[in-house]
Image (cartoon, rainbow, N blue to C red):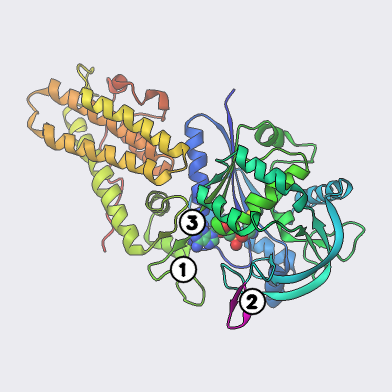
Amino acid sequence: MSKTFYVTTPIYYPSDVLHIGHVYSTTLAWTLRNYKKLLGYKTKLVTGADEHGQKIALVAQHLNLKPQLYVDKMAQKFQELWQAYKIDYDYFSRTSDLKHKKMVTKIFDQLLSSKNIYLDYYSGLYSISDEEFFTKAQAKIIDGNYVHPVSNHPLINIKEASFFLKIKEHEKWLNQYFQDHPKMIVPHKVLNELNNNFLKPGLNDLSITRSTFDWGISVPGHHPHVIYVWLDALTNYLSALGYQTKNNHDYIQFWKNGDEIVHVIGKEISRFHAIYWPIMLHALNLRQPNTILAHGWLVTTEGKMSKSKGNVIDPLKLLKKFHPEAIKYYLMSQINTGQDGVLSEELLLNVYNADLVNNVGNLLSRTAKLAEHYFPKGLKTLETFDQDISHVIKSSWENYQMHFNQFEIADALKVAINLAKQLNIFIEKTSPWNLTTKLNELNNILHVLCNGIYAVAIMLSVVLPLKMNEMLKSLGLKTFDIKQINKCDKFNNVKVKKYASLFERIKK
Ligand code: MSP
């Protein structure tokens, strides 16, 4: 039976349209899913919208819309964006879905009866924009006012009755869990930060309900309490799989008995995913995810994207200039997972031209032109295969997997690009255009090139599935199969055809 792989993106707030940073997160999860699929895993990718809370209610009110109507429109827009970016997923999770709401209510009841939840008063600082609570010690002070330590959004003082989830009680368990599973949080520096900022100073119980607004899941029998966004949001990872419903086979297959579970998130929400989420699951007696993958921020050449600076990159506008796969390729190949990365149109163009047009595109066009011209009926049977290149193909595929398995996607893609470079050098070295009277030699060389291109295409197919399928067609084959990577005779009698232009050159 094939292994399973469940990967999620954060569910995004529909308080605004999505920007290129959100596209980065989703592309990362999508690429991991594609990679695992290529290896033969049974996969599930979930993305969605985090629709409740004060912030959303305020935006809807401002637009004179009922919150439900407002989030319906925004969820539609989110899905249109993924479609435009050719990002396919298995489930779009919405916290205003009845299925999700029912599950959250059940979970709340369960935690209440296991005495993991109690009623008290919350008093402290709160950021509406980030839906996040702080103590005075955790907050930052700017011009005498308390602000969010990372986003700098203003913090307000609130005091209200609230249900709390017991966190302190599970602190020892969590510390031990991290010791036993040192690879759960990737990159490791995120765990160090959480240790210094939250775990070492000691955790506080978490306020999980609010009573000053009503756009949320009500706590049955406790009007006016509604469940505060993070308990509502994090549990979407379970409701998306049908947890607590009759139709729960996905939950059983991908979560309970699943092989790998990965949550892709931006680093600023690692506190919720790495501290509160594991504790929630532990309190519910459920299994833990294998990996919380916290990536860095996408910034522009002028620094952080912000509405006030007017430098937020609109992903739909970017699509007017670039193919979605070119953008996704940039995001995956130029940003090291876990680190911040820069995006600008100029950088995108340079990478596109260098890696895809000049290197990969050129390699295919030179090879296919010769093959079609001299072997229109198909390549002849292979006689001898260049051992050096055979070795390079084998070790490239191994290195690629080694990097991918450690979430080093940019490094993995570099392996593919380097292989394409070596094949271009091989063309220069062997000058096949001078061998037109030595067709046996030319045939052997074309076999080497086609096999090399096949390996490059498989490796890039996790980010460029459409383009790499075109490449495969040009090579005269129908499907990618990783078992074929190291078999050199797969091009015997195969008709290779010229492809008009795989990657159109974009002028500056
Ligand atoms: N709704 C919560 C997440 C709940 S998950 C159970 C939330 N939503 S959000 O709309 O604010 O999206 C935050 C996520 O968007 C980040 O964690 C990150 O994945 C992505 N990004 C937002 N801005 C980004 C950048 N500038 N760069 C990269 N990713 C960015 O938090």
Q: Quadrant of ligand 1?
A: bottom right
- The residue wearing badge 2 is 146
Ligand 1 is within 8 Å of the C-beta of the residue at disc 3: yes
Q: Is residue 189 visible?
A: yes
Which quadrant is home to the N terminus?
Answer: top right
Give the spatial CA distance, label 3 vs label 1. 12 Å
To which quarter of the image does residue 483 belong? top left
Residue 106: x and y, percent?
Answer: 83, 47
Q: Say which residue appears at 13% left-offset and 23% top-offset.
A: 441
Q: Earlier in the sequence, mark 3 or mark 1?
A: 3
Amino acid type of the residue that numbered disc 2 sits on in the rendered structure: Tyr
* Magenta span includes 243: no
Q: Identify the secondary structure beneath mark 3.
A: loop
Q: Nearer the viewer, mark 1 or mark 2?
A: 2
To which quarter of the image does residue 494 belong? top left
Q: Earlier in the sequence, mark 1 or mark 2?
A: 2
Give the spatial CA distance, label 1 vs label 2. 21 Å
Ligand 1 is within 8 Å of the C-beta of the residue at disc 1: yes
Q: Identify the secondary structure beneath mark 2.
A: strand
Q: Is residue 360 left or right of residue 436?
A: right
Q: Earlier in the sequence, mark 2 or mark 3?
A: 2
Amino acid type of the residue that numbered disc 1 sits on in the rendered structure: Lys
**346 versus 286 height, above or below:** below
Q: Say which residue appears at 43% left-offset and 43% top-offset.
A: 408
Q: Identify the secondary structure beneath mark 1.
A: loop
Q: Is residue 312 left or right of residue 420?
A: right
Q: Main secondary structure of the magenta part?
A: strand
* Mark number displayed over residue 304: 1
Give the spatial CA distance, label 2 vs label 3. 25 Å
- The residue wearing badge 3 is 296
Amino acid type of the residue that numbered disc 3 sits on in the rendered structure: Gly
Span of residues in magenta? 140-147
